[in-house]
Amino acid sequence: MKKNPWSASWRTLITALVALAFFAAACGSDASEGEASSEGEASNEGDEGAAVLRIGAIPDQEPERLQRTYDLLSDYLAAELDVTVEYVPVTDYQGAVTAFRVGDLDLAWFGGLTGVQARLEVEGANAIAQRDIDEAFTSVFIARADTGIDTIADVAGLSVLEGRSFTFGSESSTSGRLMPQSFLAEAGIEIDSSFDGAPGFSGSHDATIEVVAAGSFEVGALNSEVWDSRVEAGDVDPSEVIEIFRTPPYYDYHWVSQPELDARFGDGFQDNVVAALTSLDADDPDHEAILELFGAGSFIVTENANYAAIEAVGRETGLIRS
Amino acid sequence: MTGPEARIPTLSSGRRATIAILAAIAWAASRAGVGDEVVNRRGFGTFGEFWRAVLKPELASEFVTLTAESAAVTLAYAVLGTALALVLGVLGAPALSALLVPRHRALGRLFWLVSRSILVVPRAVHELLWALLFIQVLGFDPMVAVLAIGLPFGAVTAKVYAETIDEADPAPFLALRATGASKLAALFYGVLPDIRGELTSFAFYRLECAIRSAAILGVIGAGGIGFQLDLSFETLRYSEIWTLIAALMLLSGLADRWSSAVRRATGPGVKRASFAALAVLLPLSWRWVTLDPSALWSDRTIDLGRRLGDDLWPPRLGPGRWSELLGAMVDTTAMSLLALAIAGFGGLAAATAVSRPTGRAAHNTALGGLRRMVLRLILLLLRAVPAPIWAFLMVLVLFPGLWPGAVALGIYNLGVLGRLFAEIIEDRDTASADGLLLTGARGVQTLFYGTLPTAGPRLTSVALYRWEVIVRETVVVGVVGAGGLGQLINEHLAARDFAAVAGAIVALVVVSLAIDSISAWLRRTLRTGSSNGRQVAG
Amino acid sequence: MTPVSTGRAPVAELTAVSVSLGDRPSALSPILVDIDLVIEAGERVALVGPSGAGKTTLLAVLSGMVQPVAGSVSVLGVDPSNLSGRTLRAHRSRLGIVNQHLDMALPLQVIHNVNAGRLGRWSTASSLWSLVRAAGRNEATEVLDRVGLADRAFSPTDTLSGGERQRVAVARVLRQQPDLVLADEPTSSVDPRLADDVMGLLCGTVEAPSGWTTVVSVHEPDLARHHADRMVGLRDGRIVFDRQPGEVSVADLTDLYRANPTDHPTGG
């Protein structure tokens, strides 16, 4: 007679299930009673003693560069503001808006569009500071060299892109999607019908360069700052990809803060943050590295009203619908 | 299919179903477009660069440590998600079982219909979408990944467990009931002992699937290997990507092995050891990701949950109205069909090449063994790399449209189906193939005269179940502009338009349900509705 | 046809009971026709007759699994179809069931299949806990001892031979201590010697009297003659005789098992 394969494991299974239930119950009650066990995480509301300022950014650069940038900035802000500063990395644009929406970020570096979206979802949030270059930011249109597309002189000239295949960067990018789409619309190009096929979304500025170089798309649009730095670094082969147009300027990247910073960190805290950011000085060797990583000469004060135009474009293009 | 049936009596219903499937695939291919406009030769440069990097993976100790830590996070999510799924499945299955809640009375039938409909939604919505919704409420919390895996998997587990209960011999249950045992006691004394082998196999198959899901969830920032892959991909660091892929292959390969071993185990040792291992892994995983369920009932969660509810409800159409939504539904269907065709036919070819010759008459050579090992590794690679990564690679070499997404899903699922097919082929009754080999038939001939006729029904059944999974997976390749509902959902998310997201999800559920019923109908028509197919494909 | 009466309160009483395949009495598919049967406490009733005579259905009517389309049923003082929930469970816990196919979970250890006899009286929670740590070990071992399986209490049931499994089924009933045992061909798959043991245990004719009432269907009239104190002959869903074993003649049995001239032979 063959030995039964299941005799004891049956008992093991039931014991395991019972143990699982107890374990889950025990852990549940532990966590709800002993708040102390969840370090720092629960400091969201009124936990004055261990106030942590959490900062984050849309991932428009490579992650290591972001990490380096925000590590330096965190140290600087911690020293200036006398609070613990924690950098929370996020992998996509909407992830950053979500983190701000749920309150996981106190201070976030957004693009024009994501900043407006974040403020629309968190009532009372404020645009507080931006780089000097963000007052007049631009996008570039690039094309494969062998498409034969000439340099385009003005916005109206974008109409020659009719019938080409085209890619944006991230869906939520201001310079890689929103403003290019808006300028295209001005030139009479509707993204759903004028191109050869539906427009692509490469996911990032770097990926846009890559897929245009690969020929997957004939034309693409991206952040001019990223383009310039890649060209400067020699990462772009001019025989493959060329710049065909640079857009008129618009307001872009900016810092947005949660509404109740003063209540949580003390009166005047938000002003102190702005002061700390704007007093970064390119001539100060300690500050220089930070500004250079941000690609900025300095930070300047900004306000919500500066983004009314972005919001209007967002509504026209259907990227702001609330 | 149009003429009167009496005139063409030779066309069996099975053959008609086969013709219908082939016609549907042809339709999908024509919708995606065929000809010169599909392959983009210029993209092969970057594509080749990616593959060449396989020879120089990033081995700096920091990165290897990071990879190992991320792998542990991915494993932890899978273990915790599976545990939650099992708890939900065990609690839910009795309610769905016809044996425990008979459907011949109006009330029982109503209860069954209601609970079944409630369970349809978690299953029809992909883990990635669940995660995207939970993240709006919980923020970047490990609970997001655990819930995103546990909820849909729990629904599948409940359904499969209920079906397993109902397919068991009811006589012992009824006899115990006749002597006054309660339903639950009769279930434990009369039914479960007979089916616990199947229940255990399915539990560990879920764990295997959970690892692949956990890797995808990382892509939206839940951490783990998927997260690192996403970071490395954004900056196109192929060497790092290969290190991470190697870790995923290791993890996925071990989980597959484990799940297979449990499924095929004949002695008590494997299953007992497996449960013991799971019991150890569970608290370790809990600690590793510092899981804190209290986040579920914090004030902030309740507040944000209410807000998300308001944002989602009522669902509405996006700016593109019905034409956009219906077009996306059709695209999703076409994409899933193409992916199924690639995965099914490719998987079959791969499986016949990798399955060990069994039976007395088979030749087993060392060279054959090596070839099979290499092929198995390739299959493992195909399923260990998350579908969005495949999609990005496909965008390089295929022109935009439905093809990149379809091919990406196709090759990813080829990896999954190839392995399941190989297992079925190896486990089948080998007598017929043996007989052929003894008469001097070649391997390929025994495939068509021995293997397929015996294993065919189960293979078809597994493939059709996989179709249901593929439909749900179309959302994960939507991110690269692969079209269909996935891309539409992505677009609505970019606009923070949750009501439109909800609308697109409803459309996805509708497509899912339609395909579930078509798949069920095909399985019935082909008379292949075996419980075994369901066990490994759900 | 006057039922034998011993003067005690009846354990079961069927009056004009008919069962058919459909919902209504039907001439086409009668399974039981117009059955009148009174069973007194302590009686050991053997149902005999060819396959398809309705023995199994009659037992199912007594256990409440099948409801008649006509007639009235009273078992242990109640009509089971009027019961539900707790009262039904309480009623059922007084019924011991042994089926031809044993209907037990073979992968379970023997002791759990024996304890299964107590499920009607145990709470669900203690039933489940008993699977982790077997309850009532002494009692279970004691009844296993009576069927000669004391040393197999912790063996998985599927490692036992067919005859041993049959004895486990009997042990389950012994463990249950029901008021009425309903056994459907409990001896069909065991050798003659064991069949005699099984019948003896079920009918309480060996060892101490069981104190319960037994209704058992059997194939071999000799077993019935030996263990029962009343034999009910069934054919084509009707009672053809109802006597003490000594009064059943060879002619009665020949007539009962004769091949049906208008139909295919149905067994015997």
Image (cartoon, grey):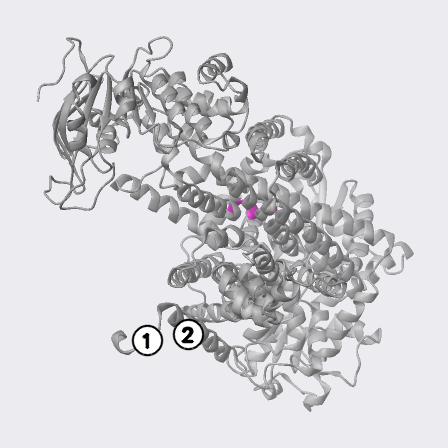
Please tell me which residue lies in front, B374 or B510. B374
The residue located at (85%, 51%) in the rendering is B62
Label 2: few (<14), some or many (≥20) within 10 Å? Answer: few
Q: Is residue B367 visible?
A: yes
Q: Residue at x 25, y 26 (%)?
A: C221
Which segment is the magenta one?
A: B145-151
The image shows residue B209, relative to residue B22, as above or below, that is: above
Q: Quadrant of residue B109?
A: top left
Residue furthest left as drawn: C1
Residue A282 magenta-highlighted: no
Name the chain under label 1: B
Label 1, label 2: how far apart the Cα atoms are: 10 Å
Q: Residue furthest front?
A: C250
Chain of the residue under label 2: B
**Residue B148 on the magenta segment:** yes
Who is closer to the viewer here, A156 or C219?
C219
Which SS type dominates the magenta stretch? helix
Tell me: residue C134, above or below residue C184.
above
Q: Which residue is mark 2?
A: B19
Amino acid type at mark 2: Ile
Tell which circle, 1 or 2, labels the residue nearer the N-terminal end: 1
Coordinates of residue C233 in the picture (x, y in percent): 18, 27
Q: At which x and y percent is residue A86? A: 75, 45
Q: Determine the secondary structure under disc 1.
A: loop
Residue C117's place in the image compared with B451, above or below, is: above
User: Which quadrant is the C terminus of chain C positioned in?
Assistant: top left
In the image, farthest residue toward the right: A285
Q: Are marks 1 and 2 in contact (CB under 8 Å)?
A: yes
- Residue at label 1? B1
